[in-house]
Amino acid sequence: MLNNYYMERNLINPFADFPGDKKFTVFAVRFLNNSKDKITYNPMMSAMFEGNEKPIRPIDVTDFYMLLSEDPNVEARMKMIKKTAYDVQFVLQSKEQKEAILIFPAIDLSTKNVTLILKDMYFGFKWANLPFAFDVMKKKEN
């Protein structure tokens, strides 16, 4: 599905053949501000939970420099990651939208479900945590 995400945008998937066979859990997240208030959000405050485990934080874009330090294509991969991944706090004014991916360490595939919480989102001066529950499905083999 991540390949489709990048193909639909005519971009190269920087996670394909990732060095060390490192895997990730990735969520495509789109914000559309239909309110009159601005929305303020720092994606690095998000958390993912596998069952009742401790929160797992997103991987910061700058962490990929270390993960890719031995890769001869580090610059091209980093360019795509920076272009498509949430990283720093942003503000959406009324009628604006933003779409990117949140990147987490790979989940344990024996996990039955995960919860993604978009924490500390501000709608004007009111804040909220937005939880989203997902069932983990095994990849279909061809």
Image (tube, rainbow, N blue to C red):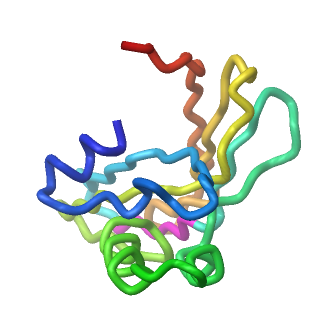
Q: Nearer the viewer, residue 10 or 39?
A: 10
- Please say whether residue 11 is one of the residues in the magenta stretch: no
| Above or below 140: residue 33 | below
Residue 45: x and y in percent read: 65, 64
> Taking 99 as reference, is 20 left or right?
right
| Above or below 38: residue 2 | above
* Displayed quadrant of residue 107: top right
| Above or below 62: residue 106 | above
- Please say whether residue 41 is one of the residues in the magenta stretch: yes
Q: Nearer the viewer, residue 19 or 96?
A: 19
Q: Nearer the viewer, residue 47 or 40?
A: 47
Residue shown at 71%/58% (left/top)?
57
> Taking 77 as reference, is 45 left or right?
right
* Displayed quadrant of residue 110: top right
Q: Nearer the viewer, residue 46 or 66?
A: 66
Residue shown at 20%/64% (left/top)?
96
Residue 99: x and y in percent read: 29, 57
Question: Which quadrant: the C terminus?
Answer: top left
Residue 62: x and y in percent read: 57, 83
Question: Which quadrant: the N terminus?
Answer: top left
Residue shown at 76%/33% (left/top)?
50
Residue 55: x and y in percent read: 80, 48
Q: Which residues are magenta?
A: 38-43
